[in-house]
Image: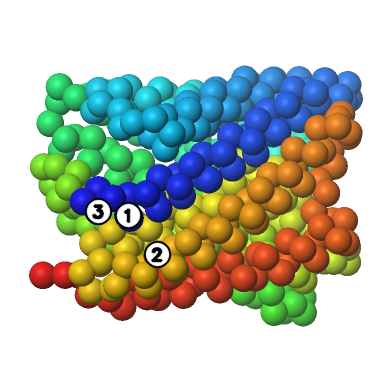
Amino acid sequence: MSNPQINTHLRVGILIVAFTWFFFTGFQFIKSAFNIYGDPSRMFWVSLSDTAGTFGLGFRTMAALIAVLTILFFVTKKDLTKPEVTMSIRWIILGEAVFMLALFPCIVWSVAAALGVSNTMGLGSFIESTLPIIVESVIIPVVLFKLFLELNPNKPARGAIKWGLISGISYLFMFWLNNTGNWIGAIERKGIEYVTMYPDHILSIVLTGGGLLALSIYAVIYTRNSAVKEAFSRLDLRKIGAIITLLGLYFLINYVLWLVLGTDQKWSTWYAWLLGHNMDLWLLSLSLIGTPLMFNDYLKQWTNKKVTALLIAVEGVGAVFMALFVSVYVAGITQLPQYVVYHSEPTVRLTMSVIGVILLALVIVALIAGLIKKAPK
């Protein structure tokens, strides 16, 4: 990064996101480990898929811990060398690849559900379950292992850039498939009126089916134009930051919509997925990385005070909200094997709703400001 001030904001953002990733994933890992054999009536392949998934969650938790330790080293001590950074990133990628690969047994379960052999957890359609899990457990691991091989200090950066961007596209399409499929499943069970009666559901479906797809397509276009770059410094960080910010906003908007407008009467498999089974909900913190990336090259057009004030506001409110978000999940460990999340407590929910709305507004302001400012010449 060319500017130390923005570099500092980016490091703080990465630190907050890394901690959010680690604690949320760690909770999911512990919860899953406690509940593998909680229901003896479950079918063999369901127990097998849960066991494999728990194994994979352990690797993702390890990857998140490496991310925390790496950025802590940056923030509190000194910069790491290029080989050290590369090694840390490769371990993180490997842990994530194993996590995704461990989902492969779920394909048997999903196929059985799609064929009507099983109605376990209400997963009854190919779009809702089978197709997303194929992308997660087959395509993404292949892409990540390729990225792992290309990310080598002794190799040209072009290969790592290309496969890093392809990895991002794979994740975006996976998020689109997963979340769109779960909305389709909820509508199949609840009826179309479940959407038309609630404006927040209409907004969520538009953001899911249309917004994530549009973001994925834009990422493809960006990758086509950027995969030939010979160095990471040649990449347009403004556009990368915008993509990351928008992805984080998708998860943040859906979570805050539930905090503000969610009720017991509106509960469905969509909310069960979003709040309970979604291992990627921690991505609602991603805007804390995306916003400083967008402003990396714009200090010549903005005064340092304006940029600093905006980014400090986003990071400060974001840090408080992420701390609350992590706490309401991690606190549920004391109730295991029961699955308890404390964001339904009235006082906690009200507090998170207010802070969440403020964070949403700040991130949207930062996103618009970053997009309308032209790059310095």
Specify the amino acid type for callout 2.
Thr
Q: Nearer the viewer, residue 198 or 366?
A: 366
Looking at the image, is 347 positioned above or below residue 232?
A: below
Looking at the image, is 335 positioned above or below residue 224?
A: above
Task: Specify the label residue 112 is tagged with.
Answer: none
Image-quadrant location for residue 166: top left
Circle 1/circle 2 CB separation < 8 Å: yes
Q: Secondary structure at mark 1?
A: helix
Q: Secondary structure at mark 3?
A: loop
Specify the amino acid type for callout 1.
Gln
| Cα separation between marks 2 and 3 | 12 Å
Give the left or right position of residue 17, taking residue 279 as reference.
left
Give the left or right position of residue 65, taking residue 197 as reference.
left
Q: Which residue is mark 3?
A: 3
| Cα separation between marks 3 and 1 | 6 Å
Q: Secondary structure at mark 2?
A: helix
Scheme of colours in the image: rainbow
Give the left or right position of residue 221, taking residue 353 as reference.
left
Q: Which residue is mark 1?
A: 5
Give the left or right position of residue 359, taking residue 73 as reference.
right
Q: Which residue is mark 2?
A: 308
Circle 3/circle 1 CB separation < 8 Å: yes
Query: Disc 1 or 2, which lies upstream in sequence?
Result: 1
- Residue 242 is situated, as x and y percent measured from the top left of the image, at 37, 62
